[in-house]
Image (cartoon, grey):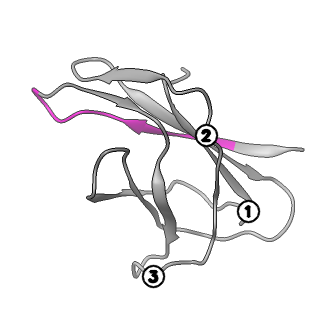
Amino acid sequence: MDVDEHQIRLVAADGVSCVLGGSLSDVRFLDADGQDLGIDPEIQPGDHVEVQAGGHREAAVHVASQIHGPRENPASVRFTLPGSGDPVTVAWPSNLSPVVRFGSITAPVN
C-alpha cells in the first residue's frame, strides 16, 4: 500500500529530561476551529521501547496514511502521552487520508 509518512517529534521542555515509551492515546485530528474531524486512527502497538528525551535527544511517533482516496485537511492533532492525563495539541502539516496508522514511541528517523 502506498502511504504518506510523517513523524511527530516529542521534545522535552528546556532544562527537562524524561523517558517516553508506549503508544499515544485519545488521538484526534481537529479542524481549524478545534472540532473533531471524526478520523479514527489505528494505534499499532509495537515493541515497548523507552526513549530518552531532553537536551538534544528526541522521541518520535511515526504516522502513515494512504495516498489514494478521499482526503481530510486537519489543522492539528491532539493526543495523550503514555502516563499523562493532559492532552497535547500540535499543528498538523498536510492533508491526509482518513485511513491513518500511528506507531508506538521510538527514536526519530532522520
Examine the image and state in which quarter residue 97 appears. Answer: bottom right
Whichever of labels 2 and 3 marks the residue nearer the N terminus, that label is 3
Examine the image and state in which quarter residue 6 appears. Answer: top right
Q: Which residues are magenta?
A: 5-15
Determine which of the numbered discs, if any, sits on residue 97 in the image: 1
Residue drawn at point x = 9 percent, y = 26 percent: 15
Image x and y of residue 100, in percent: 69, 56
Q: Secondary structure at mark 1?
A: loop
Residue 65 part of the magenta-drawn span: no
Image x and y of residue 16, in percent: 14, 28
Marks 2 and 3, how far apart at CA: 26 Å
Determine which of the numbered discs, if any, sits on residue 45 in the image: 2
Whichever of labels 1 and 2 marks the residue nearer the N terminus, that label is 2
Nearest to the eye among marks 2 and 3: give it: 2
Image x and y of residue 32, in percent: 43, 76
Quadrant (top left, top right, bottom left, bottom right) of the N terminus? top right
Q: Secondary structure at mark 2?
A: loop
Q: Secondary structure at mark 3?
A: loop
Name which residue type carries label 2: Pro
Marks 1 and 2, how far apart at CA: 21 Å
Q: Nearest the camera: 32 or 26?
A: 26
Apparent side of residue 17 relative to residue 38 in the rendered image (left or right): left
Q: Residue furthest left?
A: 15
What residue did someone put label 3 on? Answer: 35
Residue drawn at point x = 13 percent, y = 31 percent: 14
Residue 11 part of the magenta-drawn span: yes
